[in-house]
Amino acid sequence: MGLFAPWFLAALAGLGLPLYLHLLKRQTSAPKEVSSLMLYESRTQASTRHRRLRYFLLLSLRLLWLLLLIVAFANPFINRSASALASNRLVLLVVDNSFSMRAGTRLADAKDAAITVLSGKGAARAQVAAFGSQLRFMTQVIEDQSALRAAVQAIPPGDGHGNFGELARSVRAMAESVHTPIELHLFSDMQRADLAATFSDMALPDNVKLVAHAVVTKGQPNWTVESVDAPGQVWGKDAKPVHVQAVISGFGTPAAQRTASLVVNGKTTANKTVAVPANGRATVDFPALDVPYGFSRCEIKIDSADGFPADDLRRFAVARSDPQKALLIHNYGDNRSPLYIGAALSAAAQSAFALESINVSEAADRKPSNYAFIVLSDLNSLPSLLENSLSQYGRSGGSLLIAAGTSAGGRSQIPIFGAHIIETRDYTRLPGGYMAVGSSDSSYPAVAKANGWPGVKFFYALNVDPGAGPAAARVIVRLADQTPLLLEKRIGEGRVVLLTSGLDNLTNDFPLDPAFVPFIEQTARYLAGSERQGGARPVDAFLDLRNAKEQAQGVEVTDPEGKRPLTLGEAASAQSFQLTEAGYYQLRLANGRQDEVAVNPDPKESNLDVIPEDVLALWQGTGGKGSEDASAPGPSAPGKIREALWWYVMLLVLFAAVAESVLASRYLGTQREEA
Amino acid sequence: MQQRFLDPAILAGISGLDLVAKTVVDGFVAGLHRSPDFGFSQEFAEYRAYNPGDDLRHVDWNVYSRTERLYLKRFRGETNSVLTILLDASNSMQFGSHGVNKMDYARYLAASIFYLAIHDQRDAAGLITFDDEIRNFVRPSTRQGQLHRLLAALEQAEARARTDFAKPMRYFQEFLKRRGIVLIVSDFWESPASIIQNIEPLRYRGNEVVLFHVLDPEDVRPKLNRPSILVDSETKQELEVTPDYTRKEYREKIDAHLADLRDRTLGAGMGYYLLMTNRPLDSALREYLTLRGVRK
C-alpha cells in the first residue's frame, strides 16, 4: 500500500484546528452562588459522563473526517496481483461491420474469432458491440455466454465507413463510467482508410487494453466505381441526351481492361470497356442516358473480377418530368423583363422551365401553386389580394424572385420579402455613372457559376435593411458601397430571393452581361428545388427533410428495404434524416415534393489496404500497459497493479460527515434546549 | 381601573427609603377607594344608636344628614395597634438574580409598611433585624421622628451570617411586651416545622403574626445550562448539580416546601404571603391589605 500524492499529508497539520477549537470552546463550570442548598442534591456522575462521551465522540468524528479527507487527497493505492484483477476485467468485443467487411468472408471470420475469444474467457463479464461508422452496443455487460454468442452472430453487415478515431472516442467515454479495467478485443480487417487523421485521436484510456484481431493480414486488389457524374433531373420529352461519366478505380490492382455497364431500372442499356492502369483510375462516358418519365434507378456497374463484388456498382437516381412552369409578373408595358428572363431560361436550363409572362392585372386569376417559382419584376403596385396569396404560396413551400426595380422606391417595405427600404441609390450621378459589385458569397449557386458578376454596371439600387436575428435575410451580393444587391430569406418552407436592382437593362446592364444567363439558370433551379433532387449521397450523410420547424406536416421516408425508419413523431418534427444504408431511399418532403435518393458506400471503403503492423503495434501500446507507469511515483512490483483507493476513502468521508452532522445536531440541540 | 404597578428594579433606582415608601404607598392608596377597612387600627365594627352622654366626635354626620337620626361609628380597637417587623438580615437575603435582591426588596416592603402605619394610621411601629442573633432593635413608638429612625435602621441593616430562628426568638418575647401585629420578613430557608415551632410562641401572646416569604425567582425556578457547582450563600458549602435535577426534582421539592410552609403557617393561625422579588411591590402590598381586610 502506498500513496500517489504523499505531499498532501502535510495537511495533517490542519488536524490541530478542531482540537484547538474544541479545547478553546470547552465549557468550564464556574461555581454559582445560590441562596441555600437546602433543597439541592448532588447529581454529577451519569449526565456529565454522558456529555463528555458525546463531546469526545464528536471531536473524534471531526478529526476522522479531516483525516480521511487528507488521505483521499493523498490518493492511496494498494498493490494487487494482475491475476486477481483480471477476474474483475470487462471484456469488450467489438466486431467491425463497416462496408469493407462485406469483402469475402471477413465479417464471418471476425464473428468466428470473436466467439473463439469469448469461449476462452469463461464466465468473464463481457459486452458485445458492432462498429461501423459508430459504436453500437449489442448487449449490456453480462456473463451469459449464450447471449453474448447470439449477439455476436446477430451483428448485421453494414454500409458505413469505419473510423478508429470514433471507436477510441466511444471507448474513452465508456471508460469514464466503468472503473474496472477494460479488455478491448477488436475484430476487424484493419483497413488503413479507417485510421483517424491524427494518432492522438485514437488514444485509448489508461484502463483499456487493446487486443487487435485482424481477419486479414495484407491488402487485396480491388476495382470499384469510385464516382458517377450524372444529372439528377431530365426535363421534357425532347430533352437533349444526358451525358453520364463514371470513374473506375483500382486499388492495388494491375493494369486491366474492365467492362462498365449502365443499368437503368435493372436493365443494362450500354456497355463500355475501359483500360484501367495499374493502381489507377479511368473515366468512362455514356453519352446518351435515356430514362422514362418519373424516377429511374440507375447504376454504373463493372464486371466483378475481385473478392469484393459489393462495391462494383454505384447508384444514382434520375427523374424525368415535364418542364416546370414559371410565372413572371411584370408591370404593364414592361416588355424587357419577359424578353431577357425568357431568353436566359431557354438558353441555359435545358428546357427545364416554361416561362409564362403576365402583367399585374392578369395575375388575379392565376393559381401560384401551379408554378415551380414566380418572378416579380419591378412592381409599381401589388394588389393586396395577390400579395397575400403569394405570401401564402411562399410559406407553403413556393419560391419567389423579386426584382425591386425603380417602382419600389416609393414604398417603405419590399412586399412579401418584408425588408425595410432605407433609401434609393441613383449611381448615374456618380463620376463613373455606375456602381460595381463589391463582395459576393461564392458558395451561393446563383453567384458561383458567374464568378461574382464582375464588370456588371448597376445604375440604380435600393438600400434595404436585411434585419437582425434569426429572421434576418442573408446578403449574398453587395455593391461596392455596401448596398445589399442580392438577398435571400426563408419564409416558412419557401425561399424568396430579392434583387434590389431590376431585371431590365434600364437600372443596370446585367441582362446584357454573360453572367446573366447562369444567374437566371441557377436561381431558377435553386428556387424550383431541382438541385436537391436525384443524384447520389454517401452513406451516413444527412438529408434535410424540412426547413421550418413550426410546420407539422409529416414527411415520409422509405428505406432500401421498403421499411419506414421514422416514427410518427419523427415524421412530424424531424429536421433531417441520416442515410445509414446503401440503396435507394424514397422521400416525400414537408414541402410536398417527391424525391428519390441513391445512397452509396464511402469509396474509401473500397481501398482494402491494411494498417501496417508497426502502426497497429503502436496503437495497441497506447492503452493498458502505459497507464501502469503513468502516475506512479515509484516502480511497481512485478506482476502487481496499483489500484487507487480514493473512491472508497471519499465514501468514508461522506459517512463520517453524515455521522458528524447527526451527532452535532443532537449535541448542540441539547445545549439549545438547556439554554 | 387599570393599575400600574411599580417594578422593584425602578424602586432600586430611588435613593432614599422614605421616598421609596412614599412612592409605593401613595401610589396604591391613591388608586383605591378610601375604605374604613384599610389600616392597622381604628377598624370599623358597627353603627350604634346615639345615647345621651356619648362623645359627639364619633357621630356619623353623613348618616344623620340622610336619615335625621344620630348614629355613632364604633371601632374594633379603641387604642392604636403596635406593629413590629422582624427582618431577616442573613446572607441568603443578599441573593438576587436580577436588579433587586431579596434584602432590598424586604427593605422596600418594610419601609412601605412603616410609612403606611405611621404616616397614614399613626400606629406605633418597631423593627427588629436578626440573623442568628438580634442585630438591631427599634422600639415601637408613635413619637415624632419614629419613621425616620425605622428607615435609618433599615438602611443600616446589612446581610451577614446565617438565619437561625431558634436563638433570636427567645429574645423576641422580651421585646414584644405589648400585643400587636408582628410581621416576619425572611426567605425562610429552614424546615417549615422548625420555623413554625420557633415562631408560634409569638402567636400565644395574642399577637397577629404574618410571614412575608421573600424569594428570588431563581430560588424557585433555578436556571442551569450545564452541570455546575453551586455554593450556599450562608454556609459556603459546595455541591455539583445537573440541569436535569433542577428541572425536575428541585421544582417538585421547592413546590412541596412552599406548600408545607404555607399550610403549617395557616394551620397555626398565622398569615402567610409569598413575595417574589420580580413582583411589583405595590401590587403585593395591595393584595396583602385587601386580603387582610376581607379576613377581618
Image (cartoon, coloured by chain):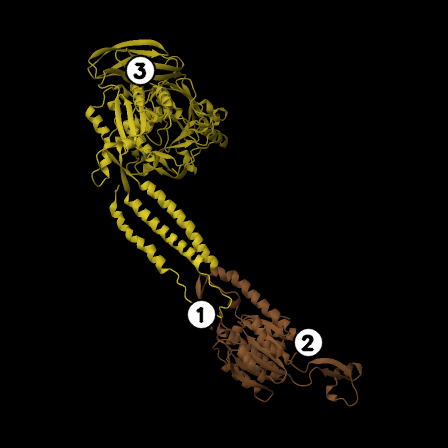
Residue under label 3, please give it.
Answer: A310
Which residue occupies the foreground of this view, A275 or A453?
Answer: A275
Residue beneath disc 1? B237
State left or right for residue B118 relative to residue A637: right
- The residue identified by callout 2 is B296
Identify which amino acid the numbered label 3 is placed on.
Answer: Ala
Nearest to the eye among marks 1 and 3: give it.
1
Q: Label 1 amino acid?
A: Gln
Q: Is residue A300 visible?
A: yes
* Residue type at the position of mark 2: Lys
Give the chain coloured brown: B
Assess whether mark 1 and mark 2 are in contact (beta carbons under 8 angstroms).
Answer: no
Residue situated in front as seen by the camera: A455 or A504: A455
Crowd tier of the residue under label 2, counting other residues whose Cα lies within 10 Å: few below 14, some 14–19, many 20 or above: few
Report the Cα–Cα distance between label 1 and label 3: 109 Å
Callout 3 crowding tier (Cα within 10 Å): few <14, some 14–19, many ≥20:
some
A291 on left or right of B40: left
Evaluate whether label 2 is on the same chain as label 1.
yes
The quarter of the picture where residue B82 lies is bottom right
Colour chain A is painted in: yellow
**Label 2 – label 3 distance at C-alpha:** 128 Å
Circle 3 — which element? helix
Chain of the residue under label 3: A
Residue contact between numbered discs 1 and 3, judged by CB atoms under 8 Å:
no
